[in-house]
Every structure is written in structure tokens, then in C-alpha cells.
Amino acid sequence: MTRRRRGRLAALAVALVAAAPAAANLEAQSVLSIRSSAFKRGGPIPTLFTCEGANVSPALAWTAPPQGTRSFALLVDDPDAPRGTFTHWTAWGIGPTVRGLGQGRAAPREGLNDAGRVGYLGPCPPPGDGPHRYRFKLHALDTVLKLPRGASKEAFKAALRGHVLAVAQLVGTYER
């Protein structure tokens, strides 16, 4: 190995060591998690929160977001639906200091679900289709989405592009 190459490698090593604390700090800041007092991660969603119950959203709570978060957005979907992923809820405009939504609580702004209604639509898989997974995905954003109430899921997903700082996911199951 030449002296010049050794010098470059040494300089690279010094740069990597100097950047390590900053990288570790960035990684620690980007951790975001979401949970519900209504059901355990990967566990069954109680009937109360489904089409067979009161069809209200479960209570959700989350941790502090990464630095630079200006708002949160929530997407709830069923990837096991017979005709492809079914969207149950799009919600946004949730302030950066908010750490959850109470049971049955609407978000400041909500879009159309795949049943064509605004707001939360609880799990409702076809009877006998086995357990479906319901993904509650919380997005920490570097902006506040400027979408009107009742926006389509396509408009919601397009508005998220390029603005997501972190995503946390909670999955529950339900079958009829």
C-alpha cells in the first residue's frame, strides 16, 4: 500500500469516527413508536372497534417524534383485503406536540376511506376469510399537509411523499 493511499484511509477513518456521534444521535432521534391501550401489538382488535361493534377508533399513543417534525399523519389499512389493500382511515393535521388520539376521537383533518366515507372505518373482513391484519401507520412529517377534509387516499399518499421523517407501525388482527 502506498503512503498516499494510507494517508487517505487514515483521513477517512478520522472522518468516520468524528461523524459517529452525530449519526448515533440522528438514529436516536428518528425512533418513533405507536401503541394502543385497546389491543396488544400483533393481537386481536376488540369487537368494539370494528363494524360488528361501535365502529369507533381505538385509543392510540405515540412517543416523541424526531427533531423537525411539524405534524403527524395516520394511515390505517388492511393489506389482506380480497381486492387488495383496503384503506380504513387517513388522518392528518395532528400537531407535533400531540402524543395520541383518544378512543373514538377524530383527527383535525380526515380523508375518504375505501367505503367512500370520511373518517375511521373499523375492521370488517369478509366472514370466514380468516384473520386480517390492520396496520396503524403514524408518519412524522416535516410539513403540515394542506389537504381538504375528505381528500382521497391517493391525494393523501401523494402529499406525504418527500415529507416523512419517521414512520411507526402498530398491527392488530381481526376476523369474522
Image (cartoon, helix red, strand yellow):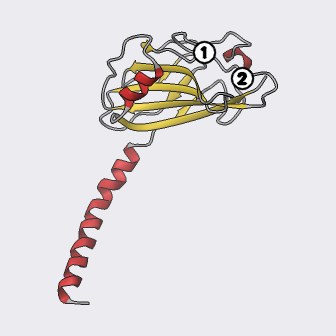
Mark 2 and mark 1: Cα distance apart in space = 12 Å
Q: Residue at x 29, y 35 (%)?
A: 68
Residue 132 lies in quadrant = top right
- Which residue lies under the disc numbered 2? 125
Q: Are there few (<14), some (14-19), or many (20+) residues within 10 Å of tag 1?
A: many
Would you say 59 lies left or right of 69 here? right
Q: Is residue 101 above or below residue 132?
A: above
Q: Residue flagged by tag 1: what amino acid is it? A: Leu
Viewer can see residue 115: yes
Viewer can see residue 33: no
Number of numbered discs: 2
- Given residues 29 and 156, the one toward you in this image is 156
Element under disc 1: loop
Q: Are there few (<14), some (14-19), or many (20+) residues within 10 Å of tag 2?
A: many
- Which residue lies under the disc numbered 1? 121
Q: Residue at x 42, y 13 (%)?
A: 109
Quadrant where the N terminus is found in the figure: bottom left
Would you say 113 lies left or right of 131 here? left
Would you say 174 lies left or right of 145 here? right
Residue 48 coordinates in the image, percent (x, y): 70, 15
Residue 36 coordinates in the image, percent (x, y): 60, 27
